[in-house]
């Protein structure tokens, strides 16, 4: 082995893990170096797997049956491997290729050298998030599909155009050839699901000299300004060429959450969105550049099943709707120093209901008393007395009740 060879392969792996220049011994790492590529033949996902009980019942979830890529297994009980990571599983599909390697198992307390096989990353044969399966014998596929794999073996890009590759990938997995991968930018950390869902830990990109590949969130700010994009569903505007990468589209993806820092997002909102209730209107949603969280989907539900939903703002809370804003509740409380109804320029104070009712009742009672006196009066003196009483009552209402009949808080127009 040349000096250059020692920089790569198992020796390099051992040196990296141990943190020093001397390779660690295989017997000290449970034969860590025995890394092997195998084909997934089945995976335990529920109690209906034929070996569910044998492989540990629910503790065996994610366990795969596999066979060597070079030497297919001919027996009934294939060897098995468990996921290496318990809290971060990327479960493979049937006919995908994974790496397996030995690590300690639950019997290590009895025999310290006891190991079992564990699997790690799916090998990205097609470098695609949807699936990376490869048939055991491409020659058995339909002629149109054989071309896909023959061309790929020759170094060409695999491009499935008939929406199917005829590979068995599992009992429920239905291949969709129109799933597009995300276009990455320098420094991005991206997690992609198999169905057009993803999380991008990215940034603003403004310094591409050719202007090619810029994304729609990099029109403001500086390169390196952070952004987080959580996206579900790639939308309907993309074509069927699933090998072509794309960037997220907040207006077309089914559901999105954007956490920005300096970016401006081209969010399309309803045409009737207005801010007429404001004296100083907020900046339009698709013009604001800065830190904000945008949630965009066909429907938004905020449900609190044990406590409150609390909305607070340093400036205002604005509500816009095409049809109406509805409030259904046993009790509605609005505590404010001033309430304007109908228009931000409302100047007409509302009348207090109880005070107004009492005032009208006093007037009615006084008028009735006066008219009864007039009806029964036998002389002018009696009418004069009744008139004086009515005048005194009306004057008291005018002086004591009428000034307090209007609200100092609620106004309408």
Image (cartoon, rainbow, N blue to C red):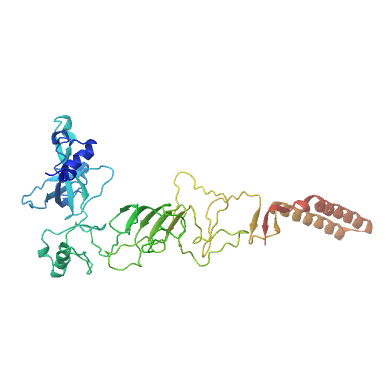
For the residue pair 36 and 57, the one nearer the viewer reads as 36
Q: Quadrant of the N terminus?
A: top left
For the residue pair 331 and 408, the one nearer the viewer reads as 408
**Horizontal side of residue 110 vs 196, given as left or right:** left
Residue at left offset 15%, top offset 35%: 25
For the residue pair 382 and 30, the one nearer the viewer reads as 30
Q: Choose top left, top right, bottom left or bottom right for residue 166.
A: bottom left
Residue at left offset 66%, top offset 49%: 337
**Horizontal side of residue 391 vs 331, given as left or right:** right
Q: Position of residue 204 (x, y in %)?
A: 41, 55
Q: Position of residue 343 (x, y in %)?
A: 64, 61
Depicted 284 relative to depicted 5: above or below? below
Q: Position of residue 92 (x, y in %)?
A: 21, 52
Residue 57 in sight here: yes
User: In the displayed image of the protein, which residue is found farthest to the top?
Assistant: 110
Give the number of marks.
0
User: In the displayed image of the protein, which residue is found farthest to the left?
Assistant: 74
Residue 379 in sight here: no
Q: Position of residue 138 (x, y in %)?
A: 12, 63
Q: Quadrant of the C terminus?
A: bottom right
For the residue pair 399 and 372, the one nearer the viewer reads as 399
């Amino acid at each position: 082995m040349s000096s250059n060879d020692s920089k790569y392969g198992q020796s390099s792996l051992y040196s990296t893990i141990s943190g020093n220049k001397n390779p660690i011994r295989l017997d000290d790492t449970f034969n860590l170096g025995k890394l092997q590529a195998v084909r997934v033949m089945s995976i335990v996902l529920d109690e209906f797997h034929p070996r569910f009980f044998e492989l540990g019942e629910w503790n065996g979830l994610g366990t795969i049956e596999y066979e060597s890529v070079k030497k297919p297994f001919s027996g009934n009980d294939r060897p098995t491997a468990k996921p290496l990571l318990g809290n971060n599983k990327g479960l493979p599909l049937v006919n995908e290729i994974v790496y397996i390697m030995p690590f300690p198992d639950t019997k290590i307390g009895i025999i310290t050298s006891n190991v079992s096989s564990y699997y790690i990353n799916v090998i990205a044969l097609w470098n695609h998030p949807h699936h990376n399966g490869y048939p055991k014998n491409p020659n058995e596929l339909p002629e149109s599909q054989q071309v896909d794999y023959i061309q790929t073996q020759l170094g060409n890009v695999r491009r499935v155009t008939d929406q199917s590759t005829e590979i068995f990938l599992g009992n429920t997995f239905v291949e969709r050839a129109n799933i597009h991968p995300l276009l990455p930018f320098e420094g991005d950390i991206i997690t992609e699901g198999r169905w057009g869902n993803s999380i991008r830990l990215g940034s603003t990109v403004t310094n591409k000299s050719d202007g090619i590949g810029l994304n729609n969130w990099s029109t403001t700010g500086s390169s390196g300004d952070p952004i987080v994009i959580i996206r579900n569903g790639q939308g309907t505007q993309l074509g069927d060429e699933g090998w072509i990468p794309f960037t997220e589209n907040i207006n077309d993806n089914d559901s999105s959450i954007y956490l920005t820092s300096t970016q401006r997002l081209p969010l399309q909102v309803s045409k009737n969105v207005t801010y007429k209730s404001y004296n100083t209107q907020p900046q339009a949603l698709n013009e604001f550049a800065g830190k904000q969280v945008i949630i965009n989907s066909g429907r938004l539900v905020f449900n609190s099943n044990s406590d409150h939903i609390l909305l607070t703002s340093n400036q205002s809370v604005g509500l816009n709707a095409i049809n109406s804003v509805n409030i259904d509740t046993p009790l509605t409380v609005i505590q404010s120093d001033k309430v304007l109804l109908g228009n931000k320029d409302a100047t007409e104070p509302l009348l207090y209901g109880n005070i107004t009712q009492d005032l009208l009742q006093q007037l009615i009672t006084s008028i009735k008393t006066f008219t009864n006196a007039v009806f029964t009066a036998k002389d002018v003196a009696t009418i004069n007395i009744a008139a004086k009483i009515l005048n005194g009552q009306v004057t008291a209402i005018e002086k004591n009740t009428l000034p307090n009949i209007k609200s100092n808080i609620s106004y309408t127009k």
